[in-house]
Amino acid sequence: MATAAQFSYITVIAPNLHLNDKRFAFSRLVNGGGKFYPGFTSSRRKPRLLSVVCNNSSPPSDISSTAKIRSEVLSPFRSVRMFFYLAFIASGGLGGLIASTRLIAALANSSRAAEVPEILKGLGIDLAAVSIFAFLYYRENKAKNAQVARLAREENLSNLKLRVDEKKILPVSAFRGIARLVILAGPSAFISECFKLSMPFTDGLLERGVLVIPFATDGISPNFEFEENEELEEKISRRKRLWQLAPIYVTEWTKWIDEQKKLASVSPESPVYLSLRLDGRVRGSGVGYPPWNAFVVQLPPVKGIWSGLLDGMDGRVL
């Protein structure tokens, strides 16, 4: 989303410029060694080439072009509706202006007093049309801005990084179509309790492609205790797989989660969870512990004969 900085180079030829001039008494870079020598003078008088770099970078936009394109794809006829709303507003406004001038002329001429009721009727229709279509345009534009803002937040989420193992770091977008991510944000004690509560549902969650992203807001790494038992080795392996992801670049994750809490009017200290669909969009969220049993009941398996038919049954998008 960041706008690339644009640079322009200006070359100036200065044949009479002396490097020992007091007006230019700053440190100069001398070729050969790359060191700075303050007050360096040269006896040669030949044209000097000065390169001036102008930085024309602009602040990054909060809304990416990708989010706008996705909004157009999701609502392809919204722009058409908004265009016609504006056209009807302009038509009604023009009709109201004409009716107003006719009304003034009729009121100024007593012989045209009989036309006043008809003119008022037309003026009322024009004003009503302008009001109705202005309301419809306002509502459509508000819905568009809300949708674009939501898609922009989802795009920011997709760019956040996760550590899969010691050698692999992937963005959240890499899990689209593969896993349903559940983000847990809260103190370390909250994360540890969520870990314990998810234990009976481990197999069901993995069958539905659920992977957990624990994010400790207090900076303390949660303690995940896995029993070392050869008989339970496969079960322990599945537990580790469910909780294998770890967020990195804490500042970016903190910023995104704080924005989500602010939009939902949730206290910054409250522990929350967010569940994502297979397509990476936010499916559900809440304060407190995630409903592991509800995930198992509501979500379809990612493998088997029903996987292709039920891929879109992740629930509505928030």
Image (cartoon, grey):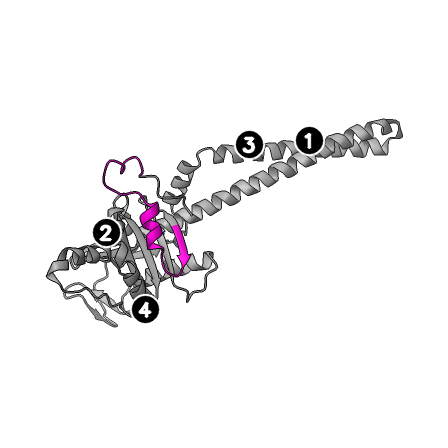
> Residue 95, labelled with which disc?
1
Going by the numbered disc 3, the residue's amino acid type is Phe
Q: Residue furthest right?
A: 110
Sequence-earlier tag: 4 or 3? 3
Q: Mark 4 points at which residue?
A: 189
Disc 2 crowd rating (10 Å Cα; few below 14, some 14-19, many 20+) is: some
> Residue 288, labelled with which disc?
none
In this image, 11 relative to 126: left or right?
A: left
Q: Residue at point 27% right, 54% down?
A: 201
Going by the numbered disc 1, the residue's amino acid type is Gly
Give the extent of the magenta segment. 284-310
Sequence-earlier tag: 1 or 4? 1
Distance between the alpha carbons at the discs numbered 4 and 3:
55 Å
Sequence-earlier tag: 1 or 2? 1
Q: Name the residue under label 3.
A: 84
Whether pointer 3 and pointer 1 mark residues with C-beta atoms closer than 8 Å, the reply is: no
In front: label 4 or label 2? 2
In front: label 1 or label 4? 4
Please indicate, yes or no, whether residue 74 appears anywhere in the rendered image: yes
Closer to the camera in the image, 22 or 236: 236
Sequence-earlier tag: 4 or 2? 4
Whether pointer 1 and pointer 2 mark residues with C-beta atoms closer than 8 Å, the reply is: no
Q: Which residue lies furthest to the bottom in this view?
A: 38
Please identify the quarter of the rendering in which residue 71 is found. top left
Going by the numbered disc 2, the residue's amino acid type is Asp
Q: Please check the rendered image and state whether residue 308 is part of the magenta-colored stretch, yes or no.
A: yes
Distance between the alpha carbons at the discs numbered 1 and 4:
67 Å
In this image, 238 relative to 252: left or right?
A: left
Going by the numbered disc 4, the residue's amino acid type is Ala
Distance between the alpha carbons at the discs numbered 4 and 2:
24 Å
Q: Name the residue under label 2.
A: 203
Count of all numbered marks drawn on residues in the image: 4
